[in-house]
Amino acid sequence: MRFSIERGALLKAVGQAQSVVERRNTIPILANVLIEAEGDRVSFRATDLDIEVVDKAPAVVERAGATTVSAVTLHEIVRKLPDGALVSLAEDGAAGRLTVTAGRSTFNLATLPKEDFPVMASSEYSANFSAPAPVLRRLFDKSKFAISTEETRYYLNGVYMHVATSEDGPVLRCVATDGHRLARIDAPLPPGAEGMPGVIVPRKTVGELRKLLDDDEAQIAVSVSETKVRFATPAITLTSKVIDGTFPDYSRVIPTGNTRRLEVDATEFAKAVDRVATVSSERSRAVKLSLDEDRLVLSVNAPDSGAAEEELAVAYGDERLEIGFNAKYLLEIASQVDRENAVFLFNSSGDPTLMREGGDTTAVYVVMPMRV
């Protein structure tokens, strides 16, 4: 195998591949990237046995072939090469070496046989549809902060992507929750997604998927089966196993009878929460919201570190209310708001609070209060 490739294209392809590779693994081949050169393209394939990513890049292929080499080492080499460099890769199968040449730099890397590289078994996908990158980006970006990190509740360690019915008809919905907060984001249902099985997309896959969704013009082909999900652009294919578990009935925790309405400038609110939380104790991170007519007072009282208070002008016309929250949860939810105003709907100081962006019901957040 021998080919030449522009450094930028190589860096992007190898970067995508090496981020999937687990740093600590007991199977040496899983630390490698499978490089396959054919025609006028080279593909770079990496896997951790749960996720597989294949990134194709244009190249001048002199001799077709395939080999595997350490993904992290190759990425570090390419990263340190000068911009615009032309990189040549040549494999010596007999010596088990891959030579990487750019300008006056030459590197000889150890390879492992391509036959040892595990390829994820293909799956019959029951639903295939395509969606614009910005639509998928919004679904996952706005929900991923609520993914649980508790390993024991493994079925909450991802984003539940499924077809649901909203007031406006069927939608593609992403939900994530950790028991303390919940995010539910809707998008118009793409043609072909109607019969899609609901799947829990793991946290690591959501992180890797984000790299595919940066191009606003891209159309992402999505394929879903009971056990796998695949996201593909013409250059990159990301295939992942889904979490084998049942996502809980989230609709039960979304309050419907909250009538006390607070409207506040989302940016101002987030900054104020951040400021007063500076003195909160690391353990509780509690901040108290005291609501009165058109007035919100945020306060923190931490006996060991001090106290803080800040007042905001808001739109609120209901009876007086005092309610406490974890400052981190409030900040994360407030930072999801794209519009100017955030609308909070309260019931009492012990009930879950609902938050949405202005009058938009396609993004709904729930946060549990805490005693302060």
Image (cartoon, rainbow, N blue to C red):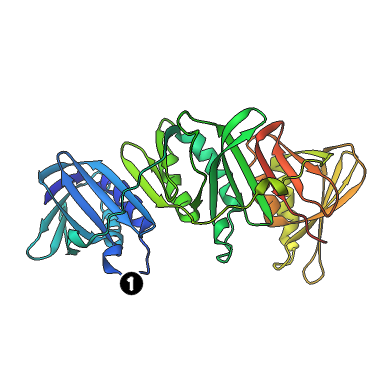
- In the picture as drawn, the residue positioned furthest to the right comes out as 319
Above or below: residue 72 compared with residue 10: below
| Residue 341 occupies quadrant | top right
Residue located at (71% from left, 48% from top): 252
Above or below: residue 132 compared with residue 155: above
Mark yes or no: residue 79 visible.
Answer: no
Picture coordinates of residue 359, whole percent (x, y): 72, 31
Count residues near mark 1 (Cα–Cα under 10 Å), then give few for <14, some for 14-19, many for 20+.
Answer: few
Q: Find disc 1 in the rendering and name its residue.
A: 26
SS for dot 1: loop
Picture coordinates of residue 293, whole percent (x, y): 91, 40
Picture coordinates of residue 183, whole percent (x, y): 63, 46
| Residue 342 occupies quadrant | top right
Above or below: residue 42 compared with residue 117: above
The answer to whether residue 179 is left or right of residue 371 is left
In the picture, which quadrant includes the C terminus? bottom right
Q: Say how many tags the image has.
A: 1
Residue located at (64% from left, 33% from top): 166
Picture coordinates of residue 61, whole percent (x, y): 13, 43
The answer to whether residue 229 is left or right of residue 194 is left
Residue located at (53% from left, 31% from top): 189
